[in-house]
Image: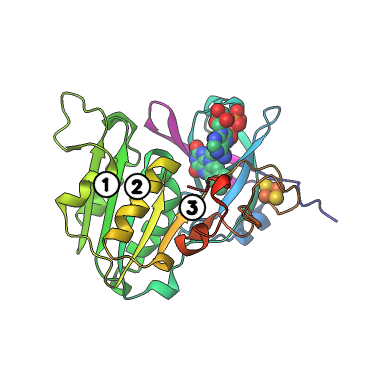
Amino acid sequence: MKSEYLPYPAIIDSIEQESFDTRTFRVVFTDEKIREGFEYRQGQFAQVSCIGAGEAPISISSSPHEREILEFTIRKMGRLTAALHKLKVGDALYIRGPYGNSFPFEEVKGKNLLFIAGGIGLPPLRSVIRLVFHHRGDFGKVKILYGARTPGELCFKKEIKRWGKLPDAQVLLTVDKPDKDWKGNVGVVTTLWDKTEISGKEAVAYVCGPPVMIKFVVKTLLDSGFEEDKIFITLERYMKCGIGKCGHCNIGGKFVCIDGPVFAYSQIKKFPEKENAI
Ligand SMILES: Cc1cc2nc3c(=O)[nH]c(=O)nc-3n(C[C@H](O)[C@H](O)[C@H](O)COP(=O)(O)OP(=O)(O)OC[C@H]3O[C@@H](n4cnc5c(N)ncnc54)[C@H](O)[C@@H]3O)c2cc1C
Ligand code: FES
């Protein structure tokens, strides 16, 4: 019997440099059966590894409707991600998964959608954003608010431009530190609230970013009338196994790897305060 911890080998098909420390790796499984059978949902993650450097949970940044595409957008942080950033097209990496739950999709059809991301928080949201645009007619207005420290750290720049031109879609960007060419907003992501009309009426919010950003975003969403069970947040926790066995990702009696990583705010607010979910 195959061990649950045994990853599938894959080859890097292409690498896109998103910013000075972030790259998107498109990968293809070497085994044809795995390639054809690997299915995932928007918001899920996989344990990604390369030999001698360990493994880490990484969100799948491509969309489930693109059956032949599997992408991971990875920021260079420590040992593993530095090793992944050294890999070139044609090199091997290893993947086990997909793991975790997913962002709601079918159940929010007909609603207006608001996506709010900070920094490396856009990759998991990109998966559901792409899926939503693929089924454009099934949803109301789509707004995407995205902030990064500097203009150079914004991911998916070309794709973001395309999203902003789609019918009934709006993309608003902000940075903390502008450069001389930046003509957009400066400030944290919640300062974009004044640039557009945002109301919780018939709307669902998807949020991913650093905990401090999430905290302020949730407060602003609640003040704008969003219901607690219509605010969906991906949580990042230290993980080891990714499959509910080691207990590393436990929070408020839930395992982020299997019960999450996506939680409604109505669930998160019940987690003990000392566990600092957001
Ligand atoms: C569900 C999930 C999805 C993720 N998706 C992505 C993704 O799409 N792209 C991406 O670049 N990263 C993602 N991450 C984060 C990534 O797993 C970590 O940055 C990972 O530890 C990097 O491994 P490393 O060996 O390079 O760095 P490490 O040596 O493990 O860590 C480098 C630094 O990051 C800190 N750190 C590591 N993991 C976490 C964590 N979970 N929470 C807070 N701080 C942490 C460490 O304390 C250290 O300071 C995700 C994490 C989770 C739990
Ligand atoms: S990472 Fe082991 S239980 Fe979640």
Image position, residue 52 (x, y; %)? 71, 27
Q: Is residue 12 visible?
A: no
User: Decide: marks 2, 1 in contact (CB < 8 A)?
Assistant: yes
Kind of residue at badge 3: Thr
Residue 270 pos. (x, y %): 54, 60
- Could you tell me which quadrant the N terminus lies in? bottom right
Q: Residue at x 45, y 55 (%)?
A: 233
Q: Nearer the viewer, mark 1 or mark 3?
A: 1
Lower position in the chain sequence, tag 2 or tag 3 = 2
Which portion, as a residue range, is magenta? Answer: 11-29
Colouring scheme, one of rainbow, by chain, secondary structure, one colour: rainbow
Checking the image for residue 190, the label placed there is 1
Spot the residue most to the right.
1
Task: List the residue tagged with mark 3.
Answer: 234
Tell me the mark number nearer the camera, choosing from 2 and 1.
2
Q: Mark 1 Cα within 10 Å, few/some/many (few <14, many 20+)? A: many
Residue positioned 50% across, 28% down in the render: 76
Q: Which residue is mark 2?
A: 216
